[in-house]
Amino acid sequence: MERALAIWVLGWPMHSTRPYLVDQNALCEETVLLTERTIEKMFRQLMNDPDRNEETFEKAEQLLDDELRAESPLRHRLTVELEELRESAAKT
């Protein structure tokens, strides 16, 4: 089967693809775009986990890197918050 286009679908917690058939000869994948509100909600869910560890911090960092532009004010704010939480967790 020929692939007509390759677009990624964001799944939780990381990227995944969801193929669907457009016609008998083409396999396509749909795109889901996240709003800043959704990204912040996902970030909060990760940070509010009582069992958070370094892997949780890495997932949050990856979320920010993948989904927000480098110049995004939200990315800057959440990155600073992430660094503070990481430092706080390291002290305990």
Image: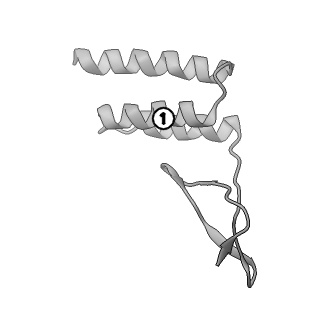
Q: Residue at x 30, y 31 (%)?
A: 54
Q: Secondary structure at mark 1?
A: helix
**Residue 61 horizontal/vertical position (percent):** 47, 30
Q: Is residue 7 above or below residue 40?
A: below
Q: Which residue is disc 1 drawn over?
A: 62
**Residue 5 horizontal/vertical position (percent):** 72, 62
- Given residues 34 and 47, the one toward you in this image is 34
Q: Residue at x 51, y 35 (%)?
A: 44
Task: Specify how the rendered protein is coloured.
Answer: one colour
Q: Is residue 23 above or below residue 27?
A: below
Question: Residue 20 appears in which quarter of the rendering?
Answer: bottom right
Q: Is residue 26 left or right of residue 40?
A: right
Identify residue type, mark 1. Answer: Gln
**Residue 88 horizontal/vertical position (percent):** 32, 16
Image quarter in which the C terminus is found: top left
Q: Residue at x 60, y 23 (%)?
A: 75
- Given residues 12 and 29, the one toward you in this image is 29
In the current view of this chain or complex, which residue is farthest to the bottom? 24
Question: Residue 21 appears in which quarter of the rendering?
Answer: bottom right
**Residue 91 horizontal/vertical position (percent):** 24, 14
